[in-house]
Amino acid sequence: MDITDLISRLAVALGIGLVIGLERGWRQRETRSGGRTAGIRTFAISGLLGGVVALLAQGMSTGEPGSAANLAGGIVLALGLTAYTVVIALFSREENRAAGSFSATTAIAGMATFALGAYAVLGNMVIAAGAAIAITALLAAREEIHGWVEKITWPELRSAVVLLAMSFIALPILPDRSIGPFGGVNPREVWIIAIVLASVSFLGYAAVKYFGARRGLLLASVAGGLASSTAVTVANARRAAAGEGAHRLLAAGVAAASTVMLLRVAVIVAAINPRLVVLVAPALFAATAVTAGFALLWMFRPQREEGGERGVEFRNPFEFWSVVGFAVFLAAIIVLGRVVGESFGAAGAVAGAAAVGLADVDAVTVSMARLAPQPLSPGQASLAILAAVASNTLAKLGIGATIGGRAFATELGLMSAASIAAGGVVLWLTFVFTAT
């Protein structure tokens, strides 16, 4: 480590203490001098102290891995942290006694400052600085976090924990390989579908709770449509079946998500195979105009029931087994689509795309765009992509009828019929004019 690198690392260690100490000092700014354990100066010195102790430990760690020299360096670092912890803990206890409070925040923040200062010298400076900023943000958001914890309900907390466990505990340990014939099923991909379904449902719940029925549904549906419009449809259908909102408002969310899905397909085609845009884009834009029109109409002119406008009141973010079960069902549909496509070759591309499109439009769009102009012609690839879009639109109608009930399905039926009809007419005109 040269002198320039050494000075840079010690400067980062000092900066870590300054940024955390700034928050601590500001929060205790009204405390009389000498009445608090640590402020800006103490935290700045704590970060620098961690860096200096790390330098001492590094100076002693000159042997091979596992050697006595390295062990001595580790002992020095451990003793330094232990001594600092004892001092900061004792002073924090006296401060709590004097103030009549009970808090370990200052002591823990001091220990983190010392440790990050040491890591800035021994490890990655960027990670150390980023961790310090994250700690400072958490400390500064105390009131907001406490207020949020006071308002959160048990179903919300349980669903959040389940979603986090699905994402960060279960997902990493699932095998990332296909099992079974015709490409099989990838357990990790199925689980990702379940996570997307749960996340979209949770996002919709949170958005409606904090932004209101119309704005919340619109925001959640647009955001959910970026990942999966099918997931938005499943979530809203379950809400409709549970009587948690006006069917037309929930259908407006599906229309908004479908609009995003159609635009997403157009962008994917343009990025992978621009030659298909002239065949695919007109039909997609026609269908987009229809779904966007329905979304705006239903969102801002919702149905009225019993003399008053019914809003949306979600009672539960999501049900674990329902999203897992539907994820397995969607995976089975994808496998079925592969079977159809591989069994009939190029001639079955449209049928296979339509089958897979019931669950996943993006996968079909990517694969078909890459297959043109060989082995598929641009016309065949375009038809396959649009067939997947149409089948996905019909799948939303099927989900609405199966899960959401007749009233919800009726709204989706109007949107589906109008968007498919508009896209179909424009597609026919496109092929007529391009052929001539």
Image (cartoon, rainbow, N blue to C red):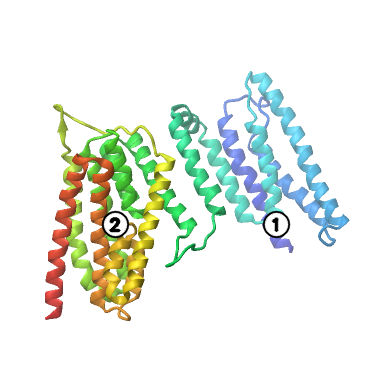
Determine which of the numbered discs, if any, sits on residue 358 in the image. none
Q: Is residue 71 above or below residue 139?
A: below
- Residue shown at 56% from the left, 33% from the top: 26
> How far apart, in angstroms, are the residues tagged by discs 2 and 1?
52 Å
Query: Does residue 158 appear anywhere in the picture?
Result: yes
* Residue 7 pos. (x, y %): 70, 57
* Residue 297 pos. (x, y %): 16, 45
Quarter of the image where one finds residue 151: top left
Q: Is residue 325 above or below residue 333?
A: above
> As drawn, is 125 to the left or to the right of 296?
right
For marks 2 and 1, give the one nearer the viewer. 2
- Residue shown at 34% from the left, 53% from the top: 228
How many labels were placed on the picture? Answer: 2
Question: In the image shown, does 19 or 229 lie closer to the viewer?
Answer: 229
Question: Is label 1 in a helix, a strand or a loop?
Answer: helix
* Residue 360 pos. (x, y %): 34, 59
In what quadrant of the picture does the C terminus appear? bottom left
Amino acid type at circle 1 is Ile
> As drawn, is 401 to the left or to the right of 103?
left
Residue linked to disc 2: 261
- Residue shown at 17% from the left, 62% from the top: 423
In what quadrant of the picture does the N terminus appear? bottom right
Residue linked to disc 1: 7
Q: Answer with mark 2 or mark 1, whichever residue precedes in sequence.
A: 1
